Image (cartoon, rainbow, N blue to C red):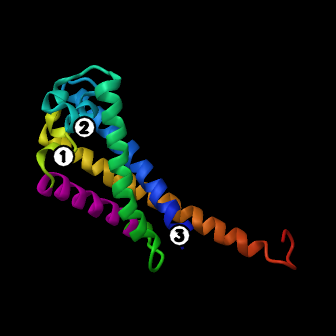
């Protein structure tokens, strides 16, 4: 069970991180900002709100922001992955809906319950609509990671059945 959960957690968190970051970077360009602006904004927990006004790439803001963004997505991937891996096998539709629901929970917690200093910081660089798009990217990434993990588990289960002792290939 733990091995199955870990696959869901890792794939979901990584995909959530990559897709939300990509969406935020595209949104930044569409709003006339540098692609690093939302990641710089994420470093506001250390450097303050002014970090979101930076468009350029630097280790101090962009590096810290990227690391924080990735760890945050992995955090939400943990909860999503544990849900996805436990109980009965979920359909791709259920995994997709679960990913979007988890992103909604993440948004509610991050922007409704957390102190301002601990929000994702995207609001320091982007419009409200772009922040929502970033959360949707997180949800889609969680879902894609979950669907990928479920598909791999099904392939492994089929392969294990074909390799039983006494059967060809086993």
**Picture quadrant where residue 105 is located:** bottom left
Q: Secondary structure at mark 1?
A: loop
Q: Which residue is mark 3?
A: 2
Q: Position of residue 54 (x, y in %)?
A: 21, 23
Q: Which residue is mark 2?
A: 42
Q: How many marks?
A: 3
Q: Rate crowding at label 1 as few (under 14), some (14 to 19) or many (20 or more) other CA atoms within 10 Å.
A: many
Q: Is residue 152 above or below residue 119?
A: below
Q: Which residue is mark 1?
A: 119
Quarter containing the C terminus: bottom right
Q: Looking at the picture, tell me which residue is in the foreground, 8 or 62.
A: 62
Name which of mark 2 and mark 1 comes first in the sequence: 2
Q: Is residue 114 above or below residue 83?
A: above
Q: Looking at the picture, tell me which residue is in the foreground, 14 or 169.
A: 14
**Picture quadrant where residue 20 is located:** top left
Whether residue 139 appears in magenta in the rendering, the answer is no
């Amino acid at each position: 069970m733990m091995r199955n959960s870990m696959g869901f957690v890792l794939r979901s968190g990584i995909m959530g991180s990559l897709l939300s970051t990509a969406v935020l970077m595209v949104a930044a360009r569409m709003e006339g900002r540098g692609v690093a602006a939302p990641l710089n904004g994420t470093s506001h927990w250390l450097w303050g709100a002014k970090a979101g006004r930076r468009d350029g790439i630097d280790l101090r803001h962009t590096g810290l922001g990227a690391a924080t963004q990735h760890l945050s997505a992995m955090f939400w991937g943990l909860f999503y992955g544990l849900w996805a891996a436990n109980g009965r096998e979920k359909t791709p539709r259920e995994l997709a809906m679960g990913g979007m629901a988890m992103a909604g929970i993440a948004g509610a917690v991050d922007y409704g319950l957390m102190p301002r200093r601990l929000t994702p910081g995207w609001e320091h660089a982007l419009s409200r609509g772009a922040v929502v798009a970033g959360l949707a990217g997180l949800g889609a990434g969680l879902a894609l990671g979950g669907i990928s993990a479920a598909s791999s588990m099904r392939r492994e289960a089929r392969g294990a059945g074909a390799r039983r002792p006494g059967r060809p290939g086993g």
